[in-house]
Image (spheres, rainbow, N blue to C red):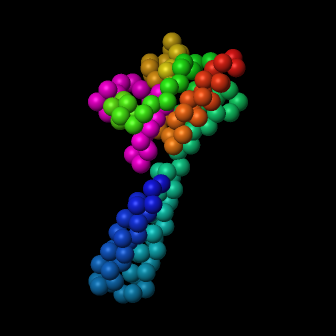
Amino acid sequence: MPLRWWVQGVMFLATLWIAVILWVPPALAWGITASTVGLFALAMIVYGNARITIADGVLRAGPARIEARFLGEAVALEETESHHLAGRDADARAYLLLRPYLKRAVRVTIEDPADPTPYWLLFTRHPVALAKRVNALRASL
């Protein structure tokens, strides 16, 4: 999660606290603020916790998973390509693991005849390394 999101969240919570403290007793204001802080922290952690892992012949990206035998070529994309493929050039059937705070992605072609998903687009901080690992997994079959 980018630092600026946390900063914006803290500013929002401070504004909320000021607004609440003016209208309700202080103890209730602190309770409302504490609850909101907890919910905000939980939301940020859950949202930013999408993991991409490769283990036991399976690629996992967020809640999705696929066996290595169905993986096609993985290509690391630059910022412009990633932006277009996540937006105007996106296939509606594709699986997208979008992270708006990341700029580059990996496109993994899916070669499962029973699966209509043409590719996975996975935004990551290390697209070249992820593409190499996916391609190495494919080659190990």
Q: Vertical placement of 24 versus 98: above or below?
A: below
- Residue at 49 percent across and 30 percent down: it is 76
Q: Quadrant of residue 116?
A: top left
Spot occupied by residue 57 in the image (x, y as percentages of width and height): 68, 26
- Confirm whether the magenta stretch covers residue 103: yes
Quick one: 66 or 1, which is closer to the camera?
A: 1
Q: Nearer the viewer, residue 81 or 39?
A: 81
Where does residue 100 sit, x and y in percent of width and height? 39, 46
Q: Viewed as shown, does residue 67 lie left or right of 42?
A: right
Q: Is residue 24 above or below residue 123?
A: below
Q: Is residue 34 visible?
A: yes
Q: Residue at x 37, y 75 (%)?
A: 14
Farthest top residue in view: 113
Magenta part of the protein: which range?
Answer: 86-107
| Viewport quadrant of the C terminus | top right
Q: Give how far across and how far down residue 77 sits, in percent.
A: 45, 31
Main SS, magenta residues: loop
Q: Give the image quarter of residue 4.
A: bottom left
| In front of the other: 18 or 52 | 52
Q: How many marks?
A: 0
| Residue drawn at 43 percent across, 85 percent down | 27
* Magenta-colored stretch includes residue 109: no
Q: Position of residue 75 (x, y in %)?
A: 50, 25
Left or right of 66? Residue 78 is left
Q: Is residue 97 visible?
A: no
Q: In the rendered view, does 81 fall on the left or right side of 123?
A: left
Which residue is located at x 41 percent, y 48 percent? Answer: 101
Residue 132 quadrant: top right
Check the image and report above or below for 3 versus 103.
below
